[in-house]
Amino acid sequence: KVVAVIMVGGPTKGTRFRPLSFNTPKPLFPLAGQPMIQHPISACKRIPNLAQIFLIGFYEEREFALYVSSISNELKVPVRYLKEDKPHGSAGGLYYFRDMIMEENPSHIILLNCDVCCSFPLPGLLEAHKRYGGMGTMLVIKVSAESAHQFGELIADPNTKELLHYTEKPETFVSDLINCGVYVFTPDIFTAIQGVLTHREDRANIRQVSSFEALQSATRTLPVDFVRLDQDILSPLAGKKQLYTYETMDFWEQIKTPGMSLKCSSLYLALFKITSPQLLASGNGITSATIAGDVYIHPSAKIHPTAKIGPNVSISANVRVGAGVRLISCIVLDDVEIKENAVVLNSIIGWKSSLGRWARVQGNGDYNAKLGITILGEAVTVEDEVVVINSIVLPNKVLNVSVQEEIIL
Ligand code: GDD
């Protein structure tokens, strides 16, 4: 049996995702019309003998309750949300719920970060892991040398694929091969985490000899039960024939900012062409409007037949799109109204917002720049003919004059 665990983190972790994380936990933000974590959850469903999927985080239980019950029913696999009383770190959180994870006596545990976007080649990862015979195997990818420092950089043996060296976000370049945040472990991972905890307790006991030193270490170090998978487990176990790597040649991105969510939405829409073409507007005849490229439209949305939509557009529930509207590269969230002849380009339109006639909301499409896409928070009103360019607008604002390169607080 296999169980999957998705680390969803908590509210303090989502700050770079503002203003989109005010009311919706980041892991539930829709990409290509589905909550961020649904993409890895659907991928888990393709693993033979999958018994359960756990989401571990420190968001309030009620924020995930509705989602876990609906997705469990839909996929016919139990999905459970487990809430930590406080953050324990990416390995500590896993360890905290070890008894529940081991309830069904799984032989393997798939561990996933919630904020990565890729094709999740999990069956291949699992097969490779069984061949290597170690404690864990991680998905890795080659990225540009300039961007590698944002991730865990690593060196792997070119023949055996063993993880030889691992450094988390190093200041000086180590390697352009990086950690994708997608792993498979045997239950021995719990013994490894236990080892880190025991070692820390021993050191803490020795330190108590000198109260000055104890005070110093208390202010300098993390809580004793906080264990990071990367620094505390992967780094020390590299080169010990316990950890191996599996390289993906598909796409991979990390979703830390709203700009990246727009990019990842387009990657998932493109993936749907292969995995689930019936979800795309061109493949399901959901609208008589003109569709260009990959587009998702929720069945409850009302689109005027003279609108032109795409490529890379996701339209959520109850959205109304008027005559002559043009939408390109955008995410339009629930209950938005877009009136006649408005244009949206490289933008995210927040829940319940409204765009007036001939309004124009656009970004320049630089997904990595702070103001490269325009983001309207929840319930923003853009009045008729108003133009909003490369800006971030916080919830409940009314824009009656045009703005450019601004953050409207
Ligand atoms: N439940 C829980 N509790 N989840 C947590 C906690 C915690 O205390 N801390 C982090 N997480 C979750 C985050 O939500 C995320 O899904 C994952 O664990 C990793 O988060 P971080 O530890 O903040 O690391 P990161 O995202 O900056 O970088 C990691 O992922 C990269 C790939 O996206 C590292 O492993 C990098 O090496 C890797 O390249």
Image (tube, rainbow, N blue to C red):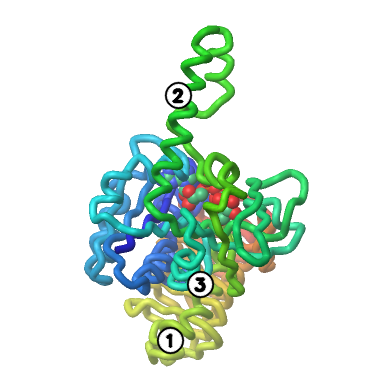
Task: Residue at 49%, 81% (x, y): give it.
Answer: 295
Q: Where is residue 26 in the image (x, y as percent from the top left)?
A: 45, 54
Crowding at mark 2 (Cα within 10 Å: few <14, some 14-19, many 20+) = few
Q: How far apart are marks 1 and 3 (CA)?
A: 15 Å
Q: Distance between the residues labelled 2 and 1?
A: 53 Å
Q: Which amino acid does label 1 sit on?
A: Pro
Question: Circle 1 sits on which residue?
Answer: 277
Q: Which mark is residue 119?
A: 3
Decide: is 175 above or below 341: above
Question: Circle 2 sits on which residue?
Answer: 201
Q: Could you say whether the residue bearing mark 1 is in a helix, strand or loop?
A: helix
Instruction: Give the quarter of the figure containing the N terminus.
Output: bottom left
The image quarter containing residue 280 is bottom left
Q: Where is residue 80 in the image (x, y as percent from the top left)?
A: 27, 55
Q: Which amino acid does label 2 sit on?
A: Glu
Q: Does the residue labelled 2 lie within 8 Å of ligand 1?
A: no
Task: Residue at 60%, 58% (x, y): give it.
Answer: 162
Task: Using the image as rendered, state which of residue 300 and residue 259 is in the foreground.
Answer: 259
Q: Which amino acid does label 3 sit on?
A: Ser
The image quarter containing residue 158 is bottom right
Q: Position of residue 163 (x, y in %)?
A: 61, 55
Q: Distance between the residues labelled 2 and 3?
A: 40 Å
- Is the C-beta separation of discs 2 and 3 under 8 Å? no
Nearer the observer, disc 2 or disc 1?
Answer: 2
